[in-house]
Every structure is written in C-alpha cells, then in structure tokens.
Amino acid sequence: MRKPTATTRRTFLKTGAAAGAAAMAGCTSQIPDDRVTVSEVETEPTADQGQDGGLEAARSTTVDRVAADPTDVPDPIDRDEPATVEVELTTKEVVAEVEPGVTVDYMTFDEQVPGPMLRARVGDTVDLTIHNDEANAMPHNIDLHAVRGPGGGAEATHVAPGETERVRFTVTYPGAFIYHCAVANMDYHISTGMFGLILVEPEEGLPEVDREFYLGQHELYTEAEAGTEGHHRFDMGAMAREEPTYVLINGEKYAITPDNYGAIPAETGESARVFYCVGGPNLASSFHPIGSVWDEVYPQGGLGGQPQRNIQTTPVQPGSCAITTMHYPVPGPIKLVDHSLSRVARKGALAVIGVEGEQDPEIFDPDPA
C-alpha cells in the first residue's frame, strides 16, 4: 500500500509541470491553497502526519451525492430531420463523499459525475449555454470531441465564476464522444469530475433496445490511502506519477451497487445498450461485464462501421468512449468492471446490473443435482 508522504502547500501553478499545462491550454487558473498538495516522490511520512496522514476532519458535504444516475439517459431521437438542440450546463465545485467518512472537493457539470449525457442527431445544431456558478473559485470551459472548431469549443466557452457563455455548433459525424473541461490544469479538473458524453446518432438512428445505461470512469488522486477518514486534498504529485487513490465508476467508490445507491435494474429477456466514457485523465479501462459478454462493441464510440461481436473485454482509452450492447437470459448480478482488477478490489471501479426474472437451466443451471 502507498504510504502517506510528506507534502507542501504550494499550488501546482508554482511547478514547472503546471507551466507546461497552462501553455498547452492557453490560459492560467488559480487553485485555492486548501484544495491541493504536491507530494514528494520518495519522502517518508513526517511525525505530525500520524496514522491518518494528518488529515483534517471530513468536511460538511454540499451535495448528497455526485454519482450520476446511470438510467438518466435522454430519449432516442425519433425524428428524421435536423433540429436545434438546446443545452444548458452549469459548472459547480462541490464537496461530497467519495466513500463513507471520506470527503473530497469535486468539480462537476451539473453537480454529477459524469456530467449529463447529451444527445443529438447528425445534422443537428447544438445551442450550448455554459454557466460558471458564482460560488466557484476557478474558471471552467468545455471541450466537446463532437465539435469541429477551436479547442472543441473550449476557447469560446471559457467562463470565470459568475459568468455565462454561449456557443452554437453543427454535429456532422456520428458516435459517442467525450466532453471535458479544458482550462489550464485540465487533468486536475477532469480527475475531480469534469467530463461527460455526447451522443450523436446517425441519420437512421440506432437499433432499438429495451434499456440504455450511462456510466463514466475516472481516477482520483488524493493525499492519503483510500478509506482513510477525513478530508482528502487533491495530490498533484500523485497525479503526475499516475498513482491514483481511487479508480471510480460514476464518481464514488462502488456507487452503483446494491450496497450503495442500488444496482441498475433489468429483467431477463431484455437487451441493453451501455454508453461508457473514460475521463481519465491518465488510465485506460478494460471494460468487462462479469457474467456475460458484450454482444456488440462500437470501439471508441465510433458508429461509422460494423460493430465487433461477442467481445469479452474492450479497451476504452482516456478521452474516449465505447458503445456496447448486451442481453441477459438468466437472472443474477452482472458486474461491470475495469478488468485491471486491483482497481475493482481496492480502488472502487465497480457497477452492478441487477437482473431479475426466471431461471433458464438450459442456459445456466446453478444446481444441476
């Protein structure tokens, strides 16, 4: 297990790495001193850290949950002509529990991780308004991989706290595409929750399924071990080393499971489509359904060709998506995981589909005796 390391309170902007990030993003941003630390690479714990790493007490939460509801999916497009799709998003910095007794500072679109799923059709015009809540401490913006334009719209949507910007764009190619905040220190903003998915349906639409689900994976870097009670500041040093404390599906450890907000409901005989985005900012996912396979996979969310079929595990790169389909002929839990399994057992990367219905011993007989 990773030992707590000695830390400083200097912000990331005071490091050379931050200067590079700012240059890449074309802007600078101020990070509040109480939100981040930069751990040293090989420093033993200091005496004042103690067994809990010297954490402050868990803070009062400002939202009940940040884990997005995986069933909150916009309806399929049922028209055959282009239209204007109006979208409003609010960037919001919140305090929430990543697991019981452990609070962190999240940055979000609409107070959820991943941000709301957006849905349009090839040829549609998206009229997007982005608000930066006046209580926020930092500027934000949005880069949508479905946009042909400077920064994917990031330059036109840069908003300081209390400001609003609006942009219009036409979606010209189909697929599932990630969107994310792209200000300076974008890796920090994405890691704390600022990413989501926009689906652009082809003109003919998508094949009908019984249910659709929406999930997002990212990693979170903090100053102490997973499960250490208290308030965890974000650790810029751990992020630079790509050593996450948590790897999460929908923003919280084991959020979409029977022991937390509940499993995703489903019934035998149904089919489902899963939209999966990986914010990263660093780790790819090996997306696998324990107890099934993917009937179809559209790699990287691409809808320009034929899907792969009967796929056990599909790679989803950071900054990309996958569209998968499945059916479930027998009841029982189907566990959706990153098959880099230490991330499941120790860092939180698990969601569950709870399938109810009649047994089919021709398919699976749990007690042949």
Image (cartoon, helix red, strand yellow):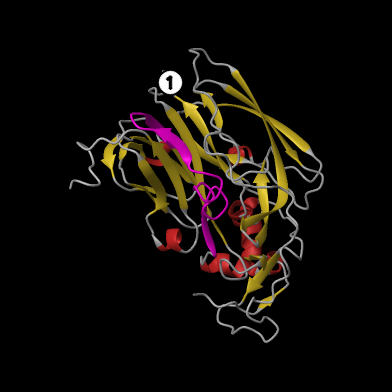
* Crowd band around label 1 with a 10 angstrom C-alpha radius: few (<14), some (14–19), many (20+): some
Residue at x-position 59% and y-position 22%: 125
Q: In which quarter of the image is residue 39?
A: bottom right
Residue 353: image x %, image y %?
43, 41
Q: Which of 86 and 233 is in front in this view?
A: 233
Magenta highlight range: 245-274
Q: Is residue 318 magenta?
A: no
- Image side of residue 10 versus residue 145, left or right: right
Identity, as a three-letter code, of the amino acid under mark 1: Gly
**Which residue is located at x 30 percent, y 42 percent?**
293
**What residue is disc 1 on?**
205
Q: Residue visible at 58% across and 16% down? A: 83
Q: In this view, does 97 lie to the left or right of 363?
A: right
Residue 323 visible within the image: no
Q: Does 34 sit above or below residue 214?
A: below
Magenta-colored segment: predominant secondary structure: loop
Residue toward you, 232 or 290? 290
Please identify the residue farthest to the bottom as the structure is shown: 47
Q: At which x and y percent is residue 326?
A: 34, 35
Classify 186 as above or below 306.
below
Instruction: Give the farthest residue toward the left.
Output: 369
Q: Which residue lies furthest to the front in this view?
A: 369
Q: Is mark 1 on a helix, strand or loop?
A: loop
Between 35 and 330, the one lying in front of the other is: 330
